[in-house]
Amino acid sequence: MGTKTIESNGKRMILKTVQIILGGLYVLVMLFYLSVILPEYLTCVDCNTEGAMRTDFLGDSVQCFGDSKVFGRVLFDFSTLTIVGFSVLLVVLFLWRRFKSNT
């Protein structure tokens, strides 16, 4: 066995480890997004009255007032961009690892 094969296997294992860690973080962020951020945003998106209380599709009460509504929108936008970024990064890592294993 040459040193090139050992270095290649080491790099492949590091790439696989990074991919597993990012995948775990992706799952945690996605669970938080789907269970907390998305229901609250969808509940308050069409609320026009100040201080209204609404119930989301999970059965939780949500206050839909000015600051909370704006903060919910910013949090929704930021978390959506984070999830899209994680998705793109994971797809690129998967395709790169697949390409490197074939060569």
Image (cartoon, rainbow, N blue to C red):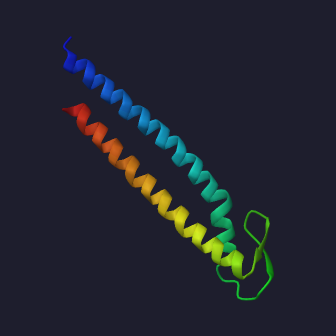
Relative depth, front residue between 17 and 44? 17
The picture quadrant where one finds residue 5 is: top left
- Horizontal relation, residue 5 to residue 26: left or right: left
Q: In this rendering, does residue 44 appear at all?
A: no
- Horizontal relation, residue 31 to residue 56: left or right: left
Residue lying at 40% horizontally and 47% vertically, measured from the top left: 90
The picture quadrant where one finds residue 74 is: bottom right
Eyeballing the image, is 65 above or below 30?
below
Relative depth, front residue between 93 and 34? 93
Quadrant containing the N terminus in the rendered view? top left
Eyeballing the image, is 50 above or below 55?
below
Residue 26 point in image, percent of width and height: 52, 48
Q: In this rendering, does residue 31 appear at all?
A: yes
Residue 35 point in image, percent of width and height: 67, 57
- Horizontal relation, residue 20 to residue 3: left or right: right
Residue lying at 68% horizontally and 77% vertically, measured from the top left: 69
